[in-house]
Amino acid sequence: MKAVVTGGAGFIGSHLSEQLVNEGHKVTIIDNFTTGRRENLDHLKEDLEIVEAELSNDGKWKHLISDADIVFHMASLADIVPSIEYPRNYFQSNVSSTLNVLEAARENKTKVIYAASSSCYGIPDDYPTSELADIRTEYPYALTKRLGEEMVMHWGKVYNFSVISTRFFNVYGTRSRTSGTYGAVFGVFLAQKLAKSPL
């Protein structure tokens, strides 16, 4: 199978790419390396193609998606506070890019799996939070990821190609950010535990 992973140099994308390679699939990564790290792919360089491109702009990258069997659309800007400060950047990265990926995919009906976000629930009433909880997009990041999810499902329905949207909650593991102001919470907890510091 020919698979494209957008945002494949990121934490989740690099693990997904590694799994696809291990299963014998032909993998192409498209990443602009804004938040993704090349070192996440160092152990895979010989086994996949890496294309540096900005998905919010039309470009030669589009044929990679239209020629693939499946695209895993993991690329996005994350984090709530920066999205409040720079909403235009988040719209461009999370909505315009998703539109471009979908348009490339519908050309040959490439299957799309989209990484949505649990941030669409805002501050929910119940914990653990059900996937059926009310949608309350309280910040630009949450809104842009929700718009992407709506677009993916709509394009699949209108243009009759296979799409799946998954809502990630707190994802953790090796290569996740464990430092910085907006490090993922489980990564921060792990770093504190390893340092024998209080959580």
Image (tube, helix red, strand yellow):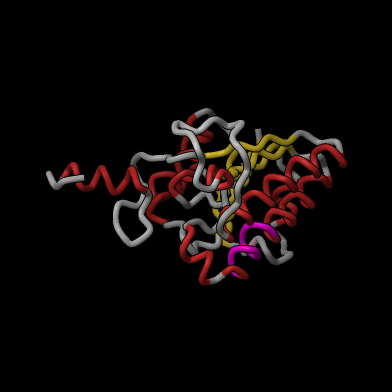
Q: Which quadrant of the structure image shows residue 53? A: bottom right
Answer whether residue 120 is magenta in the image: no
Would residue 84 appear left or right of 106 to someone viewing this image?
Answer: left
Residue 14, horizontal then vertical, whole percent = 46, 45
Tell me which segment is drawn in magenta: 89-95
Answer whether residue 93 is magenta in the image: yes
Q: Residue furthest left?
A: 196
Which residue is at a point 58% across and 42% down the rendered structure image? Answer: 27
Which residue is at a point 38% across and 45% down the rendered structure image? Answer: 43
> Which quarter of the image is occupied by the N terminus?
top right
- Most prominent secondary structure in the magenta stretch? helix
**Residue 180 visible in the current orientation:** yes
Give the answer, above or below, for where 181 lies relative to 40: below
Q: Nearer the viewer, residue 115 or 66?
A: 115
Q: Nearer the viewer, residue 35 or 63?
A: 35
Give the answer, above or below, for where 21 lies relative to 143: above
Residue 123, horizontal then vertical, whole percent = 50, 46
**Residue 28 visible in the current orientation:** no
Residue 99, horizontal then vertical, whole percent = 74, 55
